[in-house]
Amino acid sequence: MSNDLNEAAVRAARAVNGERLWASLMHLALFGARPDGGVDRHALSANDIAARSWVIETAQGLGFEVSVDDAANLWIRRKGNRTDAAPVIVGSHIDSQPAGGKFDGALGVLAGLEGLRALDEAGISTDRPIDVVAWTNEEGGRFERSCTGSSVWSGAMELEDYLDDIGADGARLGDALASTLAATPDLPRRPRRFPAHAYLELHIEQGPVLENEGLEIGAVTAIQGIRWMNVEISGHGGHAGTTPMADRRDAFQAAHRAVAQLNASMADPKDVLRFTVGRFNVMPNSPSVIPERVQFTIDLRHPDKALLDERARCITPTVEAAAAPCIASISPILFMDPMPFPEEMIAGIEATANQLGHRARRLPSGAFHDALYPALVCPSGMIFVPCRGGLSHHPDEWAEPRHCHAGARVLTAKAAKLAGA
Amino acid sequence: MSNDLNEAAVRAARAVNGERLWASLMHLALFGARPDGGVDRHALSANDIAARSWVIETAQGLGFEVSVDDAANLWIRRKGNRTDAAPVIVGSHIDSQPAGGKFDGALGVLAGLEGLRALDEAGISTDRPIDVVAWTNEEGGRFERSCTGSSVWSGAMELEDYLDDIGADGARLGDALASTLAATPDLPRRPRRFPAHAYLELHIEQGPVLENEGLEIGAVTAIQGIRWMNVEISGHGGHAGTTPMADRRDAFQAAHRAVAQLNASMADPKDVLRFTVGRFNVMPNSPSVIPERVQFTIDLRHPDKALLDERARCITPTVEAAAAPCIASISPILFMDPMPFPEEMIAGIEATANQLGHRARRLPSGAFHDALYPALVCPSGMIFVPCRGGLSHHPDEWAEPRHCHAGARVLTAKAAKLAGA
């Protein structure tokens, strides 16, 4: 394994304070804390706004420049010697699933901020600025189309295309965005897009590989592709006690037949394909009324684009046929192709981890991440740390303090190196 | 067909004003009116309270005594010559399903009130008082255990057993009841229970029989039995992109397997059994999160108690086995045995209809009704009128004005006869 780091980068990593990072993770988890230990911090919600305010105050208190862009991506800058140089960006997100955990996203943002403090305390200057970013709505738990902020910043999407999205709570994204921006009227407004030198994201693995192999760091090779779809099934309501079974157009039973066929179509003996129905809503949802309408989501993922496309293509005909005589309508929510990271970045992360004394391996990401989008416009990479039982999107999500610390060390050292420490 | 009516009862029926009844039906439908023409008037909701206020004002304006009991059943009395005599009760309910129609329940209450006006206008006195009742929470659309008011009045249930029920909107029944009673502080309080001479309920059929046969009146022979159950399935949440399919305890997929087995177990070649999954909730209900918990309802009905019991008994083992390795818990919401009405009452309704010139037949009720409970304590009967396409519990629910009129005529004549006109 080649040496990736210079002496300044190693010093920066040593200055990373694991206890301080841990305290900040526990503090951020208070915003939207659930009684079961989890976090409910939907994008652009009151909890999200409160969490952002705390991050802003913390960063400003440390003397860093904080700004926000039109998509409410939050930017924290540690200046470089060359003010005109494209920055190295590190970050992730602070929104959560409705019953999410304390680490997914939060670790990448707070480890970035801890890295800026470590550079300050170690007295290290960098050529390029380092920006820590908290992207808006990575999770898609409220507004279904996820990675809103990072997709807009990268230019893959236009902000205006998202504004009329309606959240699970009935809120319009444009309105929630305006409320969020209005909460911090004094923040300077960053341009929607600007050149970047590189992007790094630290995240919990959300899978069992690192834990099972007793490793501390994963150098992510690629993010598997995803096909998210929305299925609407329209039948005919009526009284549950009087309508003969033969005369029914029960939207619930139509959805049931569709799911049965999809389960068969998505079977994968290798267990690499992931197929999930995570949201399922019935209207009017009353015990004695035959369901008139059902809406459910399909989440389909695979690292191989050809296979993913092949399976995704069969969804519409399968659902339409199974739902008859009810009418099915299938629409895309989010399609992302598998995204490989550059070899140079993967090798650099692996070497950095090893040089800092952490056991590492390469692995693909089962989950998608904001890094998908920066990867379109600058060299990008991801660093994984283990999480207990591979569990995430769950109140019991857990990462050990020493693993968070290790991840922050690798992130800080690699960012310092990329920024020209 | 024997003559059931005396001259006064026939005069009372002739005094029933079909246009006035129709106007009152359309007016009541304004309380909780939906843009699609339906009605959303959950029991003890603000819409229900507003509707009650209008009924109270209307009845008081006509000089009838209005009172309420602890279960918020609303009572409208036309006095009899014998003040101490047990009343003839006619009525139904004015709460609706969340996407209900204008006639289910409302017709029985407003036709009762129209009957009282008709008796006044025809100058007919009766021996016994006639009480029009609007029972509380027949539908069970908000608080699942339906027929709250009639079951308490009949003594089948204690009001206190319902108070801690939690509605679909999170409200406690006891609190919603207190708010409803507080809205009409000046109404006299009726005892929870009192003797009744007879009970009559007019209702739309909610099935296709009368319409298909071109009839105007149904004399209801019995109400089929019902088994309502709640199923809770607990699995384990997790990330939809990372958790291998083989490692999942997906509560949605467990519920899917359970429904598949139930569909098979409930198959009935004669199409008499009714099996409906009307409510289905997924937690946390997010596209990229493996469902951790699912709750759904089972509505099972059949006119034969032995068959109903046999099918109901297989639900728990079937669901538990199908849901494994997830954990299923099945609890009863409402069990009602089939309820036959007395032959005397059935024959009397049939004869009354014929004597008034309406084509009638006997038929069982596919839906349950408040009449189930008065039938436990006094001779009770039900009168059906056709509804379009047999549809109910739906915004498109529709009964022709002439059928509503015919039903109100039969109800009024039969009530007048029973009350000693």
Image (cartoon, coloured by chain):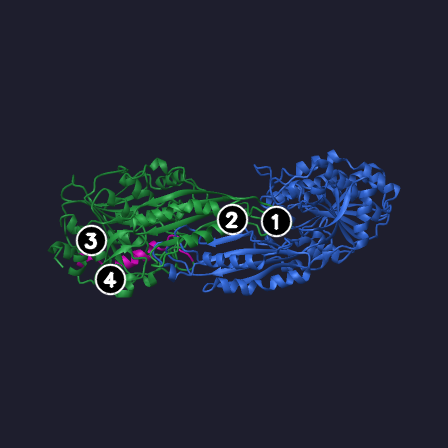
Chain colours: A green, B blue
Q: Residue at 13% across / 45% down in the picture?
A: A127
Give how far across and how far down residue A284 sits, in percent: 55, 46
Farthest residue in the right direction? B7
Secondary element under disc 2, as helix, strand or loop, is helix
Q: Quadrant of residue A86?
A: top left
Task: Please name the residue that numbered disc 2 is placed on.
Answer: A254
Q: Is disc 4 surrounded by few (<14), some (14 to 19) or many (20+) residues within 10 Å? A: many
In the visual, does B255 lie left or right of A229? Answer: right
The kind of residue on which mark 2 rests is Ala
Q: Chain of mark 4?
A: A
Q: Residue at 45% across / 52% down in the picture?
A: A261
Residue range corresponding to the magenta coloring: A13-34
Give how far across and how far down residue B133 sits, in percent: 73, 48
The answer for how far apart the CA atoms under marks 1 and 3 are is 64 Å
Q: Which mark is residue A216?
A: 4
Q: Which mark is residue A346?
A: 3
The kind of residue on which mark 4 rests is Glu
Instruction: Find out whether the residues at labels 2 and 3 contact each other: C-beta distance under 8 Å.
Output: no
The answer for how far apart the CA atoms under marks 2 and 3 are is 46 Å
Task: Please name the residue that numbered disc 1 is placed on.
Answer: B179
Quarter the N terminus of chain A occupies: bottom left
Q: Is A15 one of the magenta-colored residues? A: yes
In the visual, does A118 lie left or right of B85? Answer: left
Give how far across and how far down residue A85 sits, in percent: 16, 41
